[in-house]
Image (spheres, coloured by chain):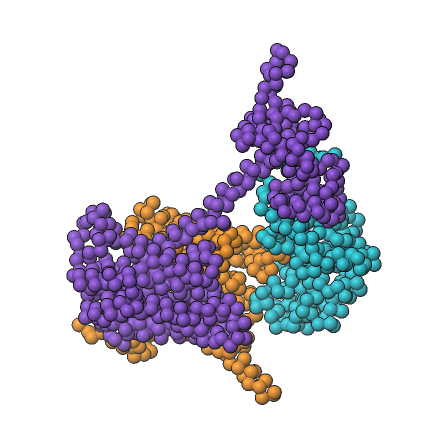
Amino acid sequence: MNNPHKPLEIHDLTVSYQRKPVLYGIDLEIEEGSLVGVIGPNGAGKSTLVKTIMNMVKPNGGYVKIFGRAPKAGISRIGYVPQRETVDWDFPVTVMDVVLMGRYGHLGWLRKIGETDRRIACECLEQVHMLPYANRQIGNLSGGQQQRVFLARALAQESSLYLMDEPFAGVDAVTEKTIVSILKEMRDRGKTLVIVHHDLASAREYFDHLLLLNMRKVAYGKTEEVFKPDLLQKTYGGRLSILSDMASKSAGVRVIEKEAYFTEK
Amino acid sequence: MKLGLENFHFAGGFSVISKILLGGVFTLLLPQVLSAEQIRGPESIEFFDRAMRFFEMRDHSVRVVALGSVLIGISCGMMGSYVVTRKLSLFGDTLSHAVLPGIAIGFLWAESKDNLALLLGASFAGFLGVACISLLKKFTKISQDSALGIVLSGFYAVGICMLTRIQKMDFGNQSGLDTYLFGQVSALSTNDLIGVCASLVLITLFITLNYKELLISGFDPEYARSVRLPADILQYLLWALLAFCVITSLQVVGVILASALLIIPAASASLLAKRMSSYLCIAASLGAISGLVGAFLSFLGERLPTGPLIVLTASFLFLLILVFRPHHGILVCWVKSRLQSHRIAMENTLKAIYQVIERHNFSETSIRMEELMQRRNLGSGECMKEVNRLSRSGFATASLDPHSPSGLPPEKRVSLTPKGWEYACRIVRNHRLWELYLTNEARYAPDHVHEDAEKIEHVLGEETIRELERILSNPRRDPHGKLIPSLVDIERGWLG
Amino acid sequence: MELMDVSLFPAFDFSRVFIEPWKTPASVAWNGQVILMGLFICWTCGVLGSFIVVRRMALMGDAISHGILPGLALAFLFTGSLALAPMWVGACLAGLACSYCIEWLRLHTPIRQDAALGLVFTSFFALGVTLISLGAGDVHLDPDCILYGEIGFVPLSPSLRIGGMDLGNQALWTMGGVCSLIMGAVLVFYRHLLVSSFDSTLARSMGIRVRRIHFGLMLGLALATVACLESVGVILVVAMLVFPSVTASFFFVRLSSLLWASFPLGAAYSIGGFHLAQWLDCSLAGAMATFAGIVFIPCCLLGPQDGIIWKLRRGTNNFRMN
């Protein structure tokens, strides 16, 4: 695919909401076909970043562009795998239903789910080794299986950019390996994947790009360039307290007037 | 309507119990309540007369109604504090509906509207409802809200069936029954008052005796269990008391609105109180006020229902608190944001003046209005308003240029007073220090930092500035190479 | 005069309960209308209720159904008549206002959702009752009717005439219209409803307006409530909303199955409730909801999906194995 726009472009993004973790002036451009791990300590704003990209949180400044489009229009091209805790597992849907939901975006208004959609859904389930469970209610699955179902749904969406919030949380070692191999395979097919990850130890082998995040972007680049003790120290070595203080204070300031933008040069 | 008097022989007992338990305020009131004969005045009393009659409290019915409403308001307010903080709000609603079949059974059992039987029946049904909810929660995957919905509507349906059945059966005296749906405060008897008092006393005793245990088990049940507090038993006792409280208030506000008296005062208190003790006090007093005002309002009109009016008063108080509460109230927030935007606009104007002066290399002390207009990107009217506001605060003075070329109208010029100059320097200093901090410490690109500093400059406190100076070791130049006015400069008054 | 039956449970007489209502053509027509009305109500509420229950908003049904009261009262006070159109507009607006207030309180104050819900709907209801007793004290719009309705009066409703043609019972037509409207909307928006209930983020990324779906559902709820109001009353609307899908959830694990199951269940409630009321000689609507409760109990105990009995037996088996 020759796309003139980068899958994900973030410019000077500032997000703050009531005393919660914030993002401060993030600049980021992700190339097509990269497998990016987002790592940082708790409360570093990893989930906030994902939420902002998914247009669930409005930024205070800066912008996000998905394939050159604003999030509102752009998120239709994102396959999103939510954090496991945010899903209602008692919801009356089967595994197959969940995967088919991934196809809804491709269906027109009032169009029925066709044979092709079912076939694709089955293939996706097969890929994550979940086809035998297709008629189970999602609550009756183990944590790893649930995660794989959502991965299958993302696969069925056939998006070009994938966003996953902690896909390895509460997952057994075997599933983790399966998921990683699927992720790598997806990358090889030219998909772009952005994955929020909490485990520093495994990050090095899983991802080929890393974004070190702690309120601000500490570093972004190839894993071997970024995975350096001094940068990691900076990421995990506490936050700049003044920065976080001021960020939450400035959240209260509304920009009331549209001022002339005078560049001080 | 005569129900108020039918159990008059209990009056002595009532007085003793309440004297012991309620103390001060009510002892003055109660003897009058009990000794007065009931006066039902003519129906066409003027509005004003009605109000007077209410305040004089000469009628027996008025006293019973007012006292009952106030007492129920207090007990519901206190109970509600625990209901709302423990996220049981809809539990009260469910409970108040679930008691309906119990009322019907109690009626059947006693074959008349006997309060004790009704109370027992209602308690039985209430506890059965609570048990059903706990069982559904424990043994099925039905979510809490559905379980509440099932118990609420299921029990209520059975209750409706029984009530309609009873109406078809041959009982002479069943008139009091439908008052349980909406409550009929005028039918409140002294006997009912005993129940209300008893529930208030029980609740007060329970809360005062178990205050800290309730606090711990409500806030952190796991911890409560770990220190061997009987959190479960407390929970069940609380439910039992809740049922009792709801049942006694049914007569006044009715099934549907009983939960309102639990929730609304407590929710209002949650907007104000910081501690559980003040929470309880606020909720109880709000409950009492709504009870009194509601009773008063319903006394004013002919057919006005007391229960709904009490609830409406409570909601009105809630609205008042929502709007006028300190710190986060709608009004306070609005005023704050107005003040803040005025301050920010003023600071921006001061900064713009500074920047114009800076562009002239600090050679002149006043600037032309036109330059300021350009800098601030404002029209002349708006700009004039800003300058006027500055001069009113003593930060700047506007004057006409004596040296303007003849023939043209004289130009307006603005100059800063020493105070204004100091303020402007401080804002510019804030802005530039922050830019420098972002570039040096947080590693932002210099062309990124301006927009952010535009906001932060208005909220940087004195302490943060000192901290920034320390970190940046008293810098002289900002990332764009401009002079950062130093403290000494500011004190000296002028630069350059 | 005949002595009235004094026991709570009159003797069960098969022919009186099951045969008599269907003996003469006139009684068949009369009772048929009642049962048809019951069917419409159960189906409408069952389908809406499935979505409301899976969204964990079962008590939102309670809230909205109470919250429409001031709308009804205001509509009556302004127009001075019991005409349908203003009543419906008033009720729907009040229902939406109620759900909006709940949302606002939840988002902008520290008050939690359950408290916000309880606070708003009781206030709305109190306002409604007060308005009614202020302005409409003598008229038919009495709170009792709104509380438990009387479906038995449905055949008394005037007949609908269009261009001189007598089309039959007006109340029945109205309810049927609402029923088909809501069915149609659910058919068209099924996928939107499913996705936005299960995973609102996915829904948003597919361009679904999640908030609009939410308020649409609330509007449907208000519409259904006001249509059912005269027949079954507020609380029994809640029963009809909650019971079908919760009962069905002991048998099925898919939302679409829950929806389909609400049709036979609705029929069972309607017919069973009718005969229960025949036997006990009590409120029809109450009997229908009671019957729903009666059906619920064995399903909850014996249902193949997580029925209590199976769970307990599995529990003891595990215990033995240990």
Q: Colour of chain B?
A: purple
Q: Which image quadrant: the C terminus of chain B? A: top right
- Give how far across and how far down residue C69 sits, in percent: 37, 54
Answer yes or no: is residue B308 visible: no
Query: In the figure, B442 relative to C156: above or below?
Result: above
Q: Which image quadrant: the N terminus of chain B? A: bottom left
Q: Residue furthest bottom?
A: C320
- Give how far across and how far down residue B360 sits, in percent: 71, 26
- Give how far across and how far down residue C88 sits, in percent: 40, 51
Q: Nearer the viewer, residue C173 or B408?
A: B408
- Give how far across and how far down residue C295 sits, in percent: 44, 74
Q: Residue at x 55, y 40 (%)?
A: B340
Q: Residue at x 60, y 51 (%)?
A: A17
Task: State the image quarter where residue B158 is shown.
Answer: bottom left
| B96 relative to B394 in the view: left or right | left
Q: Nearer the viewer, residue B131 or A88?
A: B131
Task: State the image quarter where residue B163 is shown.
Answer: bottom left
Q: Residue at x 31, y 53 (%)?
A: B293
Q: Colour of chain A?
A: cyan
Answer yes or no: is residue B493 visible: yes
Q: Nearer the viewer, residue C254 or B207?
A: B207
| B99 relative to C47 in the view: left or right | left
Q: Residue furthest top?
A: B407
Query: In the figure, B298 relative to A92: above or below?
Result: above
| A201 relative to C90 in the view: left or right | right
Q: Residue at x 52, y 40 (%)?
A: B338
Q: Nearer the viewer, residue A112 or A122?
A: A122
Q: Colour of chain C?
A: orange
